Every structure is written in C-alpha cells, then in structure tokens.
Image: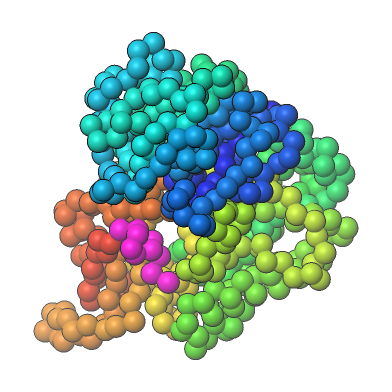
Amino acid sequence: MQHNVLILDFGSQYTQLIARRVRELNIFCEIFPYNHFPSDLSSYKAVILGGSPFSVRGEDAPHPDLSQIRGKLPLLAVCYGAQYLSHFSGGEVAASNTREYGRANLSFIKENEVFFEGVSENSQVWMSHSDSIKALPTNGVKLASTHDVEFAAYKIEGETTYAIQYHPEVFHSTDGSKMLENFLVKIAEVPQNFTPNAFVEEMVAELKEKLQDDKVVLGLSGGVDSTVAAVLLHQAIGKNLYCIFVNNGLLRKNEFQNVLDQYKGMGLNVKGVDAGDRFLSELAGVSDPETKRKIIGRVFIEVFDDESHLIQDVKWLAQGTIYPDVIESVSVKGPSATIKSHHNVGGLPDYMKLKIVEPLRMLFKDEVRRVGASLGIDPELLGRHPFPGPGLSIRILGDITPEKVQILQDVDAVFIDGLKSWGLYDKVWQAGAILLPVNSVGVMGDERTYEKVIALRAVESTDGMTADWVHLPYDFLMKVSNDIINKVKGVNRVVYDISSKPPATIEWE
C-alpha cells in the first residue's frame, strides 16, 4: 500500500487503537516495533510515536533511532513519545507528584494552530502517565495545557513535529480523532484513499501476480475471516481455489450442513469433510483445556493434510490471518504470555510443504467485514458472531462426551435463536452457552432432579481485546431460561455471566 503512516510501538496497550483510528480516516498505516522498523521510509508520509508503560527516565527506557524521521517526515509523538522528544532534546521530564491518569480538560489552546482546528477549549482528553514534561525541548512551542499539565501539547519549530501528553486514540478523548485528522490530512497531507473497494482491487491484482496458475487450498470455518479470504482468492484465481470445511463434531447445531448450503450459492469450490467421530474419540477422557485445544489442532491438521493430498499439485495454503495476529507476533514485548493457545492452521508441520498466502493479514476485524460487504457477501454471514476454533469443546468444562455435545448444541440453539427472534443478535458481539461441570438440585413436577447447570454469556466488544457483558433484558433472560430447561433434557438450572474482560476472558477455557 502507498501513502503509509508508520506507527512505532513502545509496548502500549493503546497502540492498536491508534492504528484503528488512523484506518477510520481511510488512511493506511502499519505498526512496527520501535527498534525494528523498515530502513526504507520512502513510501511513508508520516510517523506516529506511541505510548509506553516505561518511563523515559528509566534505565530500560526504549530508545528509538529517529535519525531518518525527525525533520524529514511529519512526526506526531503521543504520551511516552512526547516525553521522549523532550527528555532527550533539551527539555526536562520529571516524576509527577500524583499519577496523571484519566479524564482531563484542555484549559488553554494556542490560537490559529492547524493541529487544533475544530477543537474547543475545555475539550476532554485522556491522560495515562506517571511522568510529566517540566521543560520543553529545544525550539519547543507550547500548544495546549490542562489545569494540571502545562505542556499537554507542543510543536518543534523548524520541523513538522507535534507532541501530546494525552491519548487521542481512546474514546475518552472527545476530539482525539479530529486532532489525528488535522495532523495526518491537513499537516502531513496524507491521502485518504484506503477504502474497501481500493483494497479489493489492489489485493486481487496482487494475488493474481503472486499465485499465477498455482492451486491453493483453504480451510473454511464458516466464519467471517475465512469466508472473505475465500471470496478474494476466488476473484483472483477462480477454480484453482480448493476450500475444505471440516466438521470437528463441535460445531453449533446443524451448522455443518447450514454452512455448506450457504457456500453453495457463492460459487466457491467447497468440500465438506465430516470428521466428528474422529475428533470426539481423540478427546475422550480429556479435561485439561490446553490439551483439548492441542488435540483439536493436531487432528485438524491431520484431516486437512489427508484431504489436501487428494488435490494434485497444491502449492499454497491460504489462511484468514488478520492484523491483530500479525501485530501480536512482532510486538515490542514479543508474543504475549500464553492465556490460551490459538487454534488455526498456523502451526503447520514441515511435512505439509505449502507456501502461505494471507490476503487479510493487514486488516482489522471491522475492516474485514467492510471488505466482505464490498464483495457482496451475504450480510447475515458477515454479521455472524465470532466462534472459537476449538468449537464447543472449550464451552464444555471438563471432559467431552457425545451426550454433553448434544446438550450444549441444543442449549446454544435456543439461546442464539432467542437473541435473533428478540432482535438482540446484532447488538451483541459474541454470545454462547457454557456447560458447567456441576449438577444442581431441582424439582420438576413432583420429582427431585440432579442435573446440569448452564451459564449464558453475551459480550459487547470491537475486537475481542476487551469486552463488557451485555445487559440483556430480564424478560428475555427469563424466557430463554425457561425454554432451555423445558426443551433440553438434562438441564435444570441457568445462570448469566456478568464478568467483563479483563479480568475474565470471553471464553471460559
């Protein structure tokens, strides 16, 4: 992509959010670690330095090499970046008496500054630092203050360099997107040409050139990412794309056939492989969540490899990898501590000997959906909730049996169908049911029961990195609870999970 914006990552939790805000302006951007970014910056029109959990005064402070950036490209330094420019360029940064964290309001804005066009005094911004700039760097000019922070924003004369001590990318900075737009569009003059249609046109041309007449195999999941990847590839190489949809026996009720039926009308070359019995037999007696994930990943690769060998001369494996996965693998901190292993075809064994093609690797989830819409994919499919690769196995706490899978499929169907019939499905980012490894006492008629407990989970999110539980109507929860207990044999109690992420994860395993 041309007209890039380069974002340097110093380990802040907000770095991806900066990229998302830039993309919302129809401007393409990329994130690189501060100590490992491209040596050739000729295609970049602007650079943003992100925040960091480190202090510029610490011995472990990240030190970027800005020799090819300062004074040569428009530069916006955010939070740690602003303090770095001050501390190492003639200014002063000192520890604050109190940690400046949370909402603040601009109390002073320098007049006639393009950076603050359309931003009113008293505009709310979000602070997140324990240090504060006490003196500006050489040639620094104050642009804005808050009541507690004198140098909330500044610029450096003689350069197109701007710096702010707050985070414009977070929701709580009410005019943050406007400031980013002023810097990127009005000051740096970056073209706003990164649109879904432009992406499709460029990616299809790139795939045609890369793949030529080679055959490509793709594992479809029925989800948004793999479907959009398949349609993009189909536009580029047509019949040379071979899609395989594996039933691991842990899909939602009737999902295997329903998804195959959906794909029929899309012109894709799809083969359905029903390997449910094979997966369930391998999982018998296994309760540990990580072991379950690894078994499912291994068996999937084995089944996928068996099917791939039936196609002659396949050279490429296509994957629906998206940008958050890429960022995670190259972040400043390295891959994050393993909360759970991810199930995809990514960990391919050497014996498969296939080259990888990932047409969506530079897109965020919401961008994938927009690209899918521009490709004419059914809105119902694009609006599907995320569903974990290991399927219902990580929503059945403890060991897995065919009987438990049947119970959870039936419960899940009641819950999801209920959300749809009440007009709630599209207001929820992800929903599902969890079969708990406990039985509870109940009464049905004149009989005492001792049966399974179900937890329902519904969250709202944008990318799954953080999530809040959804305040579903009490009337709906009462109705769906009654339906589950009355229609699904083996369940006598339903609870609703009201935990947010963090500290809880979206899935229970």
The picture places residue 344, in percent across and down from the top left corner, at 61, 62
The residue sitting at 82% across, 64% down in the picture is 353
Q: Position of residue 318 (x, y in %)?
A: 71, 53
Identified at 68% across, 40% down, the residue is 232
- The answer to which of 351 and 483 lies nearer the viewer is 351
Q: Which residues are magenta?
A: 500-509
Horizontally, is 6 left or right of 169 in the view?
A: right
Residue 57 on the magenta span: no
Q: Is residue 502 magenta?
A: yes
In the image, residue 335 sits, relative to residue 175, either above or below, namely below
Main SS, magenta residues: loop
From this view, report whether residue 327 is shown above or below residue 139: below
Closer to the camera, 246 or 83?
Answer: 83
Q: Is residue 314 left or right of residue 218?
A: right
Residue 281: percent from left, percent from top: 57, 84
Please tell me which residue lies in front, 58 or 347: 58
Picture coordinates of residue 319, whole percent (x, y): 67, 53
